[in-house]
Amino acid sequence: MTTSTQARFLVLHALRVKGLASDPVLEALTGLSADDAAAEVATLVADGLAVRREGRLAGTMLTPAGRTAHPDLLAADVAASGEALSQAYEAFLPVNGEFKRVCSAWQLRLSGEPNDHADPAYDAEVVASLAEVHGRVAQLLDTLSASAGRFRTYPVRLSGALERVRAGEHAAFARPMADSYHDIWMELHQDLLLSAGRERSAADEG
């Protein structure tokens, strides 16, 4: 069972990772039920740590005070995970590099022409490469989740996006703001960066 303190950290951290998070994405990131996530958001808003945004891009985001409060909570969570997070991040880098190459192949053919998805055989090869990358990152996350349970949500979400790609939903591969495989991967990368205390640089791109 998730305690109130854990739920507060999970929501605060998810907002730090995502920036602006819709309610469904926040629930998926934290693994909390809709009711529990909404309750924590309401508390964070009341405490001045988060703000709701309405309109076309509706969701929740941290206030400056929320961003200030996050590091101490994250430090406590990371300390409980020992060396697992830093080891996982180092193992992630080469997989991230391969994922970037697969994404490039999805968007551009070897000729340099944009992939218009008119060649099912070509797309199938790229999706097979994505599945190989998925297997590698899933194994990494399975190991990490034994020490840092909050990472358990990523394999579930990545698997869901992969199945959507396999079913023919092209947007599920790399379209921004579509809960695509690429969207979720970027959240994972940001989470690992924050957890490992790293700043994004060329060395962090794999």
Image (cartoon, rainbow, N blue to C red):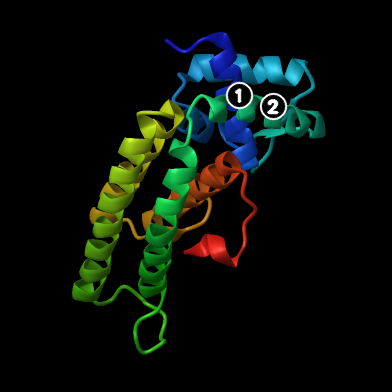
Relative image position of residue 92 (x, y in whole percent): 42, 53
Amino acid marked by disc 2: Asp
- The mark found on residue 72 in the picture is 2
- The relative height of residue 196 versus residue 118 in the rendered view (above or below) is above
In the displayed structure image, the side of residue 95 where residue 32 appears, left or right: right
- The mark found on residue 76 in the picture is 1
- The relative height of residue 119 versus residue 160 in the rendered view (above or below) is below
Q: Secondary structure at mark 1?
A: helix
Relative image position of residue 35 (x, y in whole percent): 51, 14
Figure quadrant of residue 33: top left
Relative image position of residue 100 (x, y in whole percent): 43, 66
Q: Are marks 1 and 2 in contact (CB under 8 Å)?
A: yes
Q: Nearer the viewer, residue 163 or 53?
A: 163
In the displayed structure image, the side of residue 144 where residue 201 appears, left or right: right
Amino acid marked by disc 1: Ala
Residue at (35%, 29%) from the top-left corner?
A: 146
- The mark found on residue 180 in the picture is none
Are there few (<14), some (14-19), or many (20+) residues within 10 Å of tag 1?
few
Q: Secondary structure at mark 2?
A: helix
Q: Residue furthest front?
A: 83
Q: CA distance from mark 1 to mark 2?
A: 6 Å
- The relative height of residue 11 versus residue 94 in the rendered view (above or below) is above
